[in-house]
Amino acid sequence: MMILNLLVVEDEPEFADYLRRGLSYDGYQVRVASSAEAGLEEVRRSPPDLIIFDVMLPLMDGIMACRCLREWGYAGPVLMLTARDAIDDRVTGLDSGADDYLAKPFDFDELLARLRALLRRRGYGTSILSFADVELDTRLRTAARRGSTITLSRTEYDLLLFFLSYPEQTLTREVLLENIWGTAPGLNSNVLDIYISRLRHKLGEPPLIHTLYGIGYVLKK
């Protein structure tokens, strides 16, 4: 089963820890940032599957941070948390690019239900991830293009899964190396180019994985 990565941006340490523990217990992999600036840096370093933003943050608030994310091209779901429940606040949050809005205090089961709903909309509620004419079944760990089965090694599968999780988003070499190979000592970054080349060959034409020279790669038509 695919473990989803969540980023919680919350400046109250006790509440942030409460969210981290509860979400981790529910099976998510959770990172925590204590400011909008730190949260944006986390997204640059490794884009999460979903972000939970507290609106009331020091310096840059969650609404401004969400606007920045959307301008960068981050397409994952964003859930806003706030102690304010005024209609105008909710409208402002949604207009900034947030997908949902939850006022504090809230029942944790409601938060989990909101997250599941947001993730289902992005295809995470099923075992099939697809882009263009490529499909990946995460339950069976099988891949196909235009109905023809593609045999992938474990690393090729992991790469394709990561690209399909972030379609049309720029993925830097650093992000790909960290998420596919972790912090393996002595890892030669050329290994990424080798596996990208193999995956492109197996996916066939027209190419879907494009090189952004000096930056990384992107999955697009």
Image (cartoon, rainbow, N blue to C red):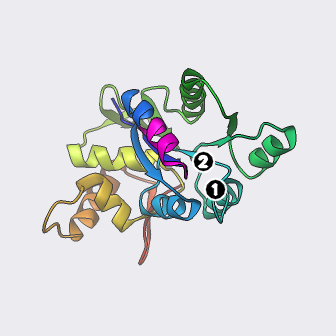
- For disc 1, the neighbor class at 10 Å (few under 14, some 14 to 19, many from 20) is many
Is 205 situated above or below 94? below
Please state the extent of the stretch shown in magenta in the rendering. 10-20
Residue 120 in which image quadrant? top right
Q: Residue at x 41, y 43 (%)?
A: 30
Above-or-below relation of 214 to 133 = below
Q: Amino acid at mark 1?
A: Leu
Which element is circle 1 on? loop
Residue hosting label 1: 57
Q: Position of residue 200 (x, y in %)?
A: 34, 56
Nearer to me, 206 or 20: 20
- Along the line of sight, the residue nearer the viewer: 30 or 123: 30
- Front-most of residues 8 and 175: 8
Q: CA distance from mark 1 to mark 2?
A: 9 Å
- Mark 1 near mark 2, Cβ–Cβ under 8 Å? yes
Left or right of 209 in this view: 78: right
Majority secondary structure of magenta residues: helix
The three-letter code of the residue at mark 2 reads Phe
Q: What residue is drawn where x is 60% and y is 48%?
A: 53
In the rendered view, does 176 fall on the left or right side of 220? left
SS category of the residue bearing label 2:
strand
Front residue (pair 134, 40): 40
Residue bearing the label numbered 2: 53
